[in-house]
Image (cartoon, rainbow, N blue to C red):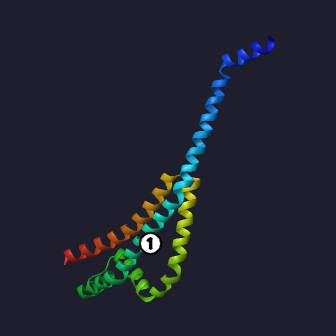
């Protein structure tokens, strides 16, 4: 009789409801973690490929297009802005030391893959996507800024 009363009082007090809530929360967390684990590797591979393509675009910009702008600036005979000078210096590094990119690129891609996968598994898929987009935007911003300064200079003359 006492056992039945204790069982009834625990049931009435909501202990069973709390236990059910805790169990459903833990299964939801496990489901969320398994989804993170499932998508972390493909997302990290995609981020690494996007960063590779962005980097190739940036290297192509520095190797082929910026030297032409450098030649144009020299022909104008005007003072070159500090931003354009820094971009020309980076371009000179790429043009003169392009062969150093060969061993650095695979190492950077492997590191990028593991960093993106770690972020996706430990912090979250959204943060990993934000990481991938932000790095690519940095690449594209460099190209856009260097293009804008050269176009402004051409229009001024």
The percent position of residue 133, horizontal first and vertical second, equals 42, 60
Q: Residue at x 24, y 74 (%)?
A: 151
Q: Nearer the viewer, residue 72 or 124?
A: 124
Q: Residue at x 50, y 61 (%)?
A: 42
Q: Nearer the viewer, residue 84 or 110?
A: 110
Q: Nearer the viewer, residue 105 or 29?
A: 29
Q: Residue at x 40, y 78 (%)?
A: 59
Q: Nearer the viewer, residue 16 or 70?
A: 16
Label 1 SS? helix
Of all residues shown, which one is farthest toward the right?
2
Of all residues shown, which one is farthest toward the top?
1
Decide if residue 52 is on the left or right side of residue 2: left
What residue did someone put label 1 on?
52
The percent position of residue 29, horizontal first and vertical second, equals 59, 42
Q: Quadrant of residue 86?
A: bottom left
In what quadrant of the picture does the C terminus appear? bottom left
The percent position of residue 105, horizontal first and vertical second, equals 50, 77
Q: Is residue 75 above or below residue 52?
A: below
The percent position of residue 27, horizontal first and vertical second, equals 60, 40
In what quadrant of the picture does the N terminus appear? top right
Q: Residue at x 62, y 39 (%)?
A: 26
Q: Is residue 91 above or below residue 50?
A: below
């Amino acid at each position: 009789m006492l056992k039945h009363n204790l069982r009834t009082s625990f049931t009435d007090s909501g202990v069973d409801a709390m236990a059910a809530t805790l169990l459903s929360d833990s299964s939801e967390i496990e489901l969320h973690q398994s989804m993170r684990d499932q998508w972390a590797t493909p997302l990290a591979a995609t981020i690494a490929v996007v960063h590779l393509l962005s980097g190739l675009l940036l290297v192509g910009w520095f190797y082929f297009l910026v030297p032409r702008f450098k030649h144009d600036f020299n022909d104008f005979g005007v003072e070159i802005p500090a931003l354009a000078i820094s971009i020309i210096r980076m371009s000179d590094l790429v043009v003169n030391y392009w062969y150093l990119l060969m061993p650095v690129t695979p190492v950077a891609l492997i590191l990028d893959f593991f960093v993106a996968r770690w972020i996706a598994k430990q912090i979250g898929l959204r943060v990993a996507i934000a990481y991938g987009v932000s790095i690519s935007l940095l690449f594209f911003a460099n190209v856009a800024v260097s293009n804008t300064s050269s176009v402004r200079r051409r229009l001024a003359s």
